[in-house]
Amino acid sequence: MNQLETPPSTLKAAAMTAAAALVWIALYGNLELLAESLLHVTGLPRTTSFGEAVYFFLFEVPKVMLLLTAVVFVMGVVHTFVSPERTRALLSGRRVGTGNALAAMLGMVTPFCSCSAVPLFIGFLQAGVPLGVTFSFLIAAPMVDGVALFLLLGMFGWRIALTYVLLGFLIAVISGLAIERLRLEGELEEWVQKLQKGDASAHDDGVALSWNDRFREGLASVRSIVGKVWLFIVLGVGLGSAVHGYVPEEFMVTIMGKDAWWSVPAAVALGVPMYTNIVGVLPVAEALIGKGAAIGTVMAFMMSVIALSAPEMIILRKVLKPRLIAVFAGIVASGIVIVGFVFNLIL
């Protein structure tokens, strides 16, 4: 066969991958229709708390699974070109904090909720990106994005919007740096540590493998990683769905409407069990402020909902050991509490 000709096996693999990509795009673009159709089959109306919770579950589970599958497949293919060793060497040559800032900025332009950001978090670890940098992305992705900026501008004005974005960015960068300083790579689950170490001899930085082999590596990554975390995704989104359908807004207003020092940490504690994205929580925040809640307290509540949700922690448990989850939650929660006090002080 001429060296310029493409082997039939590679053409077949490329065709199958393209077909799978088209199916993925069709499914992802019609998730709302799919969820509504499945809800219709159950006979439950969305006007009830239980119906809304079921709809949320039917929408979020396939969304997160589709994102996880796509990201893991792509990172599996990329992994055959650039070894973890080369990735780490590239990032280690940067000044301290640069990688965290870049990761936080990447997170700010990706409109993911906390659970949806977990697939990219796993993909970064798989590519050998330092732990603290991956956490900067994981924190920034749900907390700050372009849609949130424009909604905040429209609802609260430019001072609150820009202050929120700046402080959210700083929390992501500083938290990532703190986690990196603590050297907690040993607190990753064993199978994730193996992903980080990689096997450079298997692909020799892209020299030995054909495209067919690369696609196979991508599929192998999907089988390995998705097979390990899918149940945690279902459990995490299930918890988020239950809370989403039964949000105790009156109780939250009572707590956040009081002008007391403990209102900010109490708001953070209330926000952690919940699960939504910033677009979903902004109307709640506006309603709370309209009922007399302090702006800083409400902002702290918003940040805790979207950056420290309990469903996210359940999913991360398959990737991180309890100590690392506790350190991550503690550092981010401390930053959010500080932000809440700053908001209450200056606004």
Image (tube, rainbow, N blue to C red):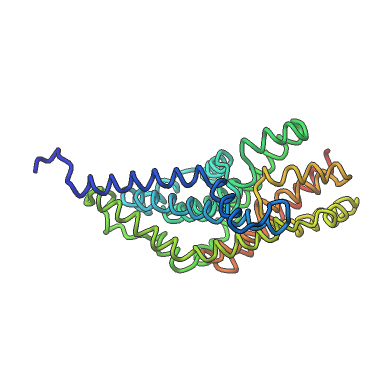
Q: Residue at x 38, y 45 (%)?
A: 21
Direction right: furthest residue: 259
Q: Is residue 281 above or below residue 195?
A: above
Q: Quadrant of residue 329?
A: bottom right
Q: Is residue 232 left or right of residue 17?
A: right
Q: Is residue 205 left or right of residue 272?
A: left
User: Does residue 325 appear anywhere in the picture?
Assistant: yes
* Residue 320 position in % (x across, y down): 54, 64
Q: Quadrant of residue 150?
A: top right
Classify the position of the C terminus by image quarter. Answer: top right
* Residue 128 position in % (x across, y down): 42, 54
* Residue 75 position in % (x across, y down): 40, 50
Q: Residue at x 79, y 44 (%)?
A: 342
Q: Nearer the viewer, residue 88 or 222?
A: 222
User: Does residue 173 appear anywhere in the picture?
Assistant: no
* Residue 118 position in % (x across, y down): 53, 54
Q: Is residue 163 above or below residue 261?
A: above
Q: Residue at x 52, y 54 (%)?
A: 62
Q: Is residue 310 left or right of residue 264?
A: left
Number of numbered discs overlaid on the protein picture: 0
Direction left: furthest residue: 1
Q: Residue at x 65, y 59 (%)?
A: 240
Classify the position of the N terminus by image quarter. Answer: top left
Q: Is residue 210 left or right of residue 162?
A: left
Q: Nearer the viewer, residue 101 or 42?
A: 42
